[in-house]
DNA sequence: CTGTTAGCGCGTTCAC
DNA sequence: GTGAACGCGCTAACAG
């Protein structure tokens, strides 16, 4: 027993398929009595329009894909929720796909989602410089909004001013007397990594503190990397007096290392993390963070997508840089003179 | 400039559409030379098969939908990752959709996803008893796997033995001398809520401790609810000596209340939470939890879906109940005699 | 207001 | 091994 088609409904209601189509999507006015009969027939047959046929005809799916590099990053949950709210208002649905930080998987996702499964895409690339990812991204023929990433061809993007955020963090720490500040952050292959290092270096320079390459660990934005590098940095006697974690996943890993090593914040170590997550807000002590406004980001995502989908075409690309604030809490203290 | 179709490829390669189709999905053998020409043409034109047309013909999308009631629950991230791994091996893709605990949204999602957008669905209902949700669920005509939920008609399901888990937790607390144990958990309208209360009551009865209705707060599995109820329970002088949080979101809220009230675990209050998340594992003190094995759950999800999709039809429904273990950490102590 | 019909892009069944 | 033709379910354009 196959699912009912629009034809079956038309037959059952004693009208033509055109009329059924019209009551489904109200494209044209239909007599009230006809509407009633059609609706009854649809109900009785348990009819649902085939999304495949509809989107083949209209070349639209009313779906937007959000490709995240790591769904376990809690920040995406709040961004997605806010974006979804806005998109729903316009009749779009948001679907999330996790690339799990695997470039191959990401390419696969772009290719799959591309071929008419979504009307637009928002994406956080796992690697801005991977040629396969870039090629797949360029092949995408629906509007794309990049989140916290930049590529060398024009594309909508929403980014965060991490450089400024990091300057604030370093200034705050140096004001507390810290001169040996370590940084674990994303790699050079993604914008957040580059921005962090840029801000970090700029702030140190202003304070005339020399930059120590060994104090900077750049790599994947994962908890594992955070743990490994924190262990490396903190398990030796000449450890830094402060640590900045340039990503909430990195912080999650670093916190594990800190606990493992029995270090006490802020007495043994001052710590600044990224993002106002439950983990940073509910830690004891509460963690000072460089925070981005997820509601604001989510809203921007929604607006960018809607503009790309509903606005006039060829309106050019749009880029915005949102600020990051330093939320001072309890995880930093004056450095102890040695 | 429209995207190329199979026709364009056929034209460019000097073959018929049938041959191109055969090259794409290897349905029948094609001469090597032809294959080469077709592939070259596809490359040159940047051709991608239209998912809509394909799925209209084949009635299959190679996509599986995972409808979660709250994407900010970190447990779903690990379950999804494991399930996705298995599904990818079989050529399926996993897409996540967040209903944000809003029944109306959930209904909308079921209806949208149903009409040929996915080949199967895994779902955590926000409310097992909402008639609209149940109706929408019954209307779904692809295989469905329920996660931690049960309904009164046959359906595949993967559940956790929270009743047993809660018994372990209560026993552990009573062994520490606790007699006034509060519980904040899901409502009667979802299985986890019912199971928690069942296990809680059973364990108390065995220990001959009287059940106090006022010590049990059942409601939505959200951080907000956890916060409110924890405030209610803990802000009066005759507060319980121990608190069990029957959900990781509830615990997140309760922890906020505990911090706000300045209570110290385990001295002022013993706490047991749900799920081995970063928040419970990295808290200070580390939180004793009733933990489910997310890898195991994710694997079960993947297997159930694959069985439903690839296995023989009408093989009946499958239900499994996985166990929950008590992970003893640092958040509980002997009760102080008053 | 309603019925009819031509494709949307593809997979597949026939003939060859 | 290959090509032509049909139809999947639907929308939109047109004719009444």
Image (cartoon, coloured by chain):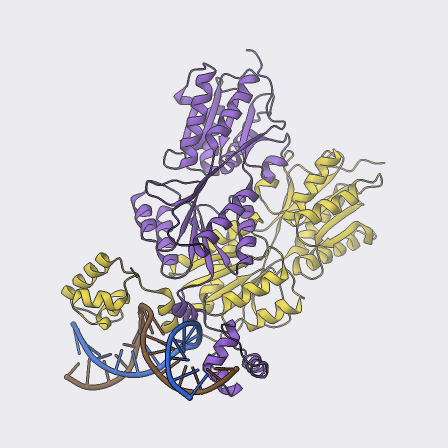
Chain colours: A purple, B yellow, C brown, D blue
| Near-viewer residue (B24 or A168) | A168
Residue B182 shows in the view: yes
Seen at 43% across and 62% down, the residue is B63
As drawn, is A129 to the left or to the right of B99? left
Residue B178 shows in the view: no
Residue A56 position within the rendered picture, expressed as x and y whole percent measured from the top left? 38, 69
Q: Is residue A192 above or below residue A79?
A: above
**Quadrant in which residue B56 is drawn:** bottom left
| Near-viewer residue (A23 or B34) | A23
The image shows a total of numbered marks equal to 0
Seen at 46% across and 29% down, the residue is A163
Seen at 42% across and 25% down, the residue is A216
Residue A210 position within the rendered picture, expressed as x and y whole percent measured from the top left? 42, 15
Residue B329 position within the rendered picture, expressed as x and y whole percent measured from the top left? 64, 39
As drawn, is B11 to the left or to the right of B224? left
Q: Is residue B166 above or below residue B31?
A: above
Q: Is residue A158 above or below residue A311?
A: above
Residue A314 position within the rendered picture, expressed as x and y whole percent measured from the top left? 37, 51
Q: Quadrant of the N terminus of chain B?
A: bottom left
Q: Quadrant of the C terminus of chain B?
A: top right
As drawn, is B190 to the left or to the right of A294? right
């Amino acid at each position: 027993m196959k699912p009912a088609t629009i034809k079956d409904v038309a037959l059952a209601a004693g009208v033509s398929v055109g009329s059924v189509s019209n009551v489904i999507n109200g494209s044209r006015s239909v007599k009230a009595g006809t509407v009633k009969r059609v609706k009854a027939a649809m109900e009785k047959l348990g009819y649902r329009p085939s999304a495949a046929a509809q989107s083949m005809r209209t070349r639209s799916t009313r779906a937007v894909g959000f490709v995240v590099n790591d769904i376990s990053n809690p920040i995406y949950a709040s961004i997605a929720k806010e974006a979804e709210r806005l998109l729903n208002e316009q009749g779009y649905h948001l679907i999330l796909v996790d690339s799990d930080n695997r470039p191959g998987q990401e390419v696969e996702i772009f290719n799959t989602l591309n071929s008419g499964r979504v009307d637009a895409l928002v994406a956080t690339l796992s690697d801005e410089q991977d040629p396969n990812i870039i090629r797949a991204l360029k092949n995408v023929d629906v509007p794309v909004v990049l989140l916290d990433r930049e590529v060398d061809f024009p594309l909508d993007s929403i980014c965060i001013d991490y450089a400024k955020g990091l300057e604030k963090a370093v200034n705050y720490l140096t004001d507390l007397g810290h001169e040996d500040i370590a940084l674990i952050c994303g790699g050079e292959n993604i914008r957040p990594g580059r921005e962090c290092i840029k801000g970090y270096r700029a702030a140190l320079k202003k304070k005339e503190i020399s930059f120590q390459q060994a104090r900077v660990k750049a790599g994947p934005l994962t908890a594992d990397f955070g743990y490994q590098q924190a262990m490396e940095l903190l398990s030796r006697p000449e450890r830094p007096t402060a640590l900045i974690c340039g990503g909430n996943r990195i912080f999650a890993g670093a916190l594990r290392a800190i606990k493992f090593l029995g270090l006490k914040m802020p007495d043994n170590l001052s710590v600044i993390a990224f993002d106002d997550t439950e983990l940073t807000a509910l830690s004891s002590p509460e963690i000072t963070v460089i925070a981005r406004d997820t509601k604001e980001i989510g809203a921007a995502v929604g607006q960018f997508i809607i503009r790309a989908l509903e606005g006039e075409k060829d309106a050019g690309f749009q880029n915005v840089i949102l600020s990051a604030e330093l939320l001072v809490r309890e995880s930093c203290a004056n450095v102890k003179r040695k």
